[in-house]
Every structure is written in C-alpha cells, then in structure tokens.
C-alpha cells in the first residue's frame, strides 16, 4: 500500500511555464460508488475511466471479499455483483487503508447484514471519527463495537431485520447521507434521509441509475428529503467515470500561478455540487475557460482551459464549503499568491479529513513564509503576488503532510511559483487518489524532485 510505504519527500522548484493538455483520472467519489453498487447489483457493471488509486482499489477488494467478481481487462473494469441483499460475510477484516469514503460507505452498506464484519484502516483513517455513521446504524439495530471515540477498528453485527429510519444528517456530509441510504437498501420499507445542506449527490444519482426506487424533494429553503425503498432489485450498469474535479484542483491552481502557463484539462466532472473551487478562482480573476460543456453518463462534464492570472483576494461564502470541501488546501495556496486577504470560513469539517487540514495548511503556509491566521473554523491568507520571499530551503520549512494526499499535492503546487523551493516530507500517499500526479505535472513542465521515483 502506498500509505504504508517508506516516505518519499518531494521538493518543488519555481517553474517557468506549464503547458500542454492533460486528462485527469476518474472521480474518486464516483469510482468508489461504481465498484460498490456494481458489486451489490445483480448482473454485470462495466466501468471505464475508473480511478485506479489505492483508496478505490481497497473498495474493490472489500466488494470481492463479500462475493463480487471484479476483473480489470485492458483498462475496463467488469464487476459481477451478488444481487441486493446477498453480500457474503467477509472472512477477514476489511482494510480500507486511507479511505474515509470507502470505509464509511461500506459500513453503511454492510451494517444491516445479520453477520459480523470488521473494518480497519491506516493511522490517518484510524484517527478519524466514525460515530457519524455508526449512530444511524445503531438506530437501525446494528450492534457496534469500536475503539475509543467511535474510531477504527470497528466491528458491526446487523440484526435479523434492520429497521428503516428517518435521519436528519447533522453535518454537511455526503458520506453520512450515503451510508444511511446504503443501509436502507437492506432494510424493509422506506428509509428517509433529510439533508439540510446539499452535498455531492452521486449516491442518489447513481442508485437511481442502478434501478433503486428513490425520490428526492427539495423544499423552498433548500432542504432535501430523500426517500429510498429498501430491498428492491439493483441491476448492473455501464459507467464512464468523468475526471475528478478535486484532483483537477492542483494542476488548475498551478497553471494559474506559474507565469506564462496555458494548460487544457480535459473531461472534468462539472456536477454543481463539486464546482465551488472553479467558481471561487474565477471570482479571484483566474482565467479559466469552460470549454465544450456536455453531458456524459448523466453528469455535466467540460474541458478547462487555464492560463496564468494575477489573482485578487476574495471572501469565500461559507455556504459554498460543501461544493469545494476537498479543495481548500489548493485554494489556500492560490490565496498565498493573491493580492489582498482571502477569507475562508465554515471550515469545521476540514479538521477531520485525512488530517486536520486546517492546521496542516496553516502550518505549511507559515513554514514557507505566508502570513495567515487560523481560526476555529476559518483561515485568512494574506497573499504575496509573484511569490517573492515565499518558500524555504531550511529544514524548518519542510511541510508535514500527515499521510494526507491533498496536503502533499497542494504544497508541491505552491513550490512551483514561490521564490524558494517548497519541500514536503512525503509524497507516497498521493497514490491514494492521484497516482499520475507527479508525472502529469512534470510532463507540463513542473520542476519536482523526488527522493525516489514515484511508484
Ligand atoms: C466524499 C464526501 C466528502 C469528501 C470526500 C468524498 C464522498 O466527505 O470530503 O473526499 O465521496 O461522499 P464528507 O462526507 O465527510 O464531507
């Protein structure tokens, strides 16, 4: 596993010009769900464009351990599912590595089954809270045994018949919403999820595509009520996974920051629940042309043409956070080069990602000379256009990544535009979400040195 491999520090140097056309690997959220729903549905699911990152592969292995057949041939993944309600008891603990989405959604999927299943993960995942998913499962009658603070390892044992619930998601979290809906697939009657703030809707869209009986209503205040009829059949589908907007964030910000750049990023998922960063960067003055917008596999997709830009600071509305929750590390780096003070608020969820991202971003920025202030759920960054004086050749400047792929990628991008280099203590875990990242960036002209060649 990439995240248990020896650390691989990386040094990013000021680069002259990024240019070229790239195609970002498949969306992580959709890739997890494609393997999961394909493994659950009856018949065959054919997946093209799957993200072959460690996180997603762990989900594939978990579905295999519960009876699905998962085969890769010439870049196409074929999953033969067991049929809804027919997962087999896994013989060994399911190890999800670094993957919060993988473990939380699978706990929802498997929780109501009347057998024992054990869930484990790496040091980062084992420090993350699982109570947000375990609480609704308990309400459905699932017995839970977990490490202190509802953390991994977790053992679930479902009741003979799970109780469908009506659940109001207490925090903006697509993982929690999805876990409850997936648990509802194996409970009789209707499971209802109320979502006060809309988050990414891939579970709803994809489950409907697989044939689940599911209805979504949105009231005047934007509160969504999702009703799912349990125990219905699901049927295999053909899925073409669009490029991940969260991975796109890094070359996108890099192309804005490195002078004289012109980069085309093809096939980017433009689902409105995922485009907060693009909207914010355009507000900051970023030259981002959205080219050839189209619908592919039921999702909005487009190509992005990005050119270097002089960015201006903005205040990011807190209600935009759910549509860019994974993109704040990249945005904070962009803000470090923008004229004025960029203010980001409503960031409480950042504290419990693969690392405490708010603390990790602040520490990394400060270590490299950026003037910024961390609040309880906010970050203000006072930028230096041109990056003069930023970066560091000093050991104190090394960015601690805390097993967090997005911290590693954000600071590598930063070092492409700072006066001095930026060093990250590890880049190996980038393989969890974007294995091609270093090669793709160096192919565009980025100067990145690795202690050893990327896996
Ligand atoms: C995801 C939901 C988000 C996001 C994660 C992927 C998903 O997590 O940060 O990377 O695929 O449902 P939360 O639900 O914790 O916000």
Image (cartoon, rainbow, N blue to C red):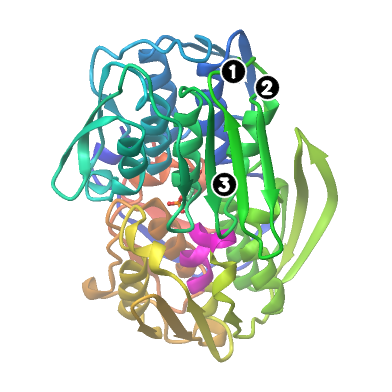
User: Position of 103 compared to 445: left or right?
Assistant: left
Provide residue 228's location: percent of width, then percent of height.
Answer: 59, 32
Q: Are the residues tagged 2 and 1 within 8 Å (C-beta)?
A: yes
- x and y, in percent, of residue 313 in the image: 59, 85
Q: Which of marks 3 and 2 is nearer the N terminus?
A: 2
Q: Nearer the viewer, residue 292 or 232?
A: 232
Give the CA distance from mark 3 to mark 2: 37 Å
Write down the region rendered in magenta. 322-333
Quadrant where the C terminus sits is top left
Q: In this view, does 156 lie to the left or right of 196?
A: left
Q: Name the quadrant containing residue 365.
A: bottom left
In the rendered structure, the answer to whether residue 130 lies left or right of residue 336 reads: left
Q: Is mark 3 within 8 Å of ligand 1?
A: no
Residue under pointer 3: 440
Residue under the point 49% across and 44% down: 177
The image position of residue 122, as x and y in percent, is: 24, 40
Query: Left or right: 357 with respect to 5?
Result: right
- Residue identified by numbered label 1: 232
Q: Is residue 272 placed above or below 453 in the rendered structure? A: below
The residue lying at 47 percent from left, 69 percent from top is 414
SS at mark 3 in the image: helix
- Residue 142: x %, y % from top left: 29, 30
Label drawn at residue 6: none
Instruction: Let me know if residue 442 is in the magenta part.
Output: no
The CA distance from mark 2 to mark 1 is 8 Å
First along the sequence among labels 2 and 1: 2
Front disc: 1 or 3: 1
Residue at which label 2 appears: 211
Dot 1 or dot 3: first in sequence order is 1
Answer yes or no: disc 2 within 8 Å of ligand 1.
no
| Along the viewing direction, whichever of 245 and 395 lies nearer the viewer | 245
């Amino acid at each position: 596993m990439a995240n248990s491999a020896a650390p691989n520090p990386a040094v990013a140097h000021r680069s002259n010009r990024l240019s070229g056309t790239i195609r970002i690997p498949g969306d992580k959220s959709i890739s997890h769900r494609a393997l999961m729903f394909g493994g659950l549905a009856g018949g065959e699911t054919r997946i093209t464009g799957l993200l072959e990152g460690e996180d997603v592969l762990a989900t594939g292995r978990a579905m295999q351990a519960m009876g699905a057949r998962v085969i890769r041939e010439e870049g196409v993944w074929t999953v033969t599912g067991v049929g809804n309600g027919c997962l087999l008891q896994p013989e060994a603990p399911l190890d999800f590595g670094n993957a919060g989405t993988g473990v939380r959604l699978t706990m929802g999927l498997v929780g109501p089954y009347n057998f024992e299943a054990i869930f484990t993960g790496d040091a980062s995942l084992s420090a993350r809270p699982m109570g947000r998913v375990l609480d609704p499962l308990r309400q459905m009658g699932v017995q839970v045994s977990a490490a202190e603070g509802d953390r991994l390892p977790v053992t679930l044992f479902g009741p003979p018949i799970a109780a469908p619930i009506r659940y109001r998601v207490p925090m903006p979290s697509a993982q929690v919403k999805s876990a409850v809906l997936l648990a509802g697939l194996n409970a009789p009657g209707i499971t209802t999820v109320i979502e006060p703030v809309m988050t990414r809707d891939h579970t709803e869209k994809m489950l409907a595509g697989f044939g689940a009986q599911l209805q979504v209503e949105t009231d005047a205040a934007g509160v969504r009520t999702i009703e799912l009829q349990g125990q219905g059949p699901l049927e295999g589908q053909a899925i073409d996974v669009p490029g991940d907007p969260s991975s796109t964030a890094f070359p996108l910000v890099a192309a804005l920051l490195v002078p004289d750049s012109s980069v085309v990023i093809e096939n980017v998922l433009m689902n409105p629940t995922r485009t907060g960063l693009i909207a914010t960067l355009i507000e900051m003055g970023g030259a981002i042309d959205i080219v050839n917008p189209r619908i592919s596999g039921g999702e909005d997709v487009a190509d992005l043409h990005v050119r270097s830009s002089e960015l201006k600071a903005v205040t990011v509305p807190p209600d935009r956070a759910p549509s860019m929750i994974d993109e704040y590390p990249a945005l904070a780096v962009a803000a470090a080069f923008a004229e004025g003070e960029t203010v980001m608020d409503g960031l409480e969820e950042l504290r419990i990602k693969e690392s405490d991202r708010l603390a990790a971003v602040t520490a990394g920025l400060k270590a490299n000379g950026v003037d910024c202030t961390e609040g309880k759920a906010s970050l203000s960054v006072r930028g230096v256009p041109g990056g003069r004086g930023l970066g560091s050749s000093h050991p104190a400047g090394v960015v601690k990544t805390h097993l967090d792929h997005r911290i590693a990628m954000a600071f590598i991008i930063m070092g492409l535009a700072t006066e001095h280099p930026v060093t990250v203590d590890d880049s190996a875990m980038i393989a969890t979400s974007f294995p091609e990242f270093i090669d793709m960036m160096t192919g565009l002209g980025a100067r990145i040195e690795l202690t050893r060649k990327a896996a």
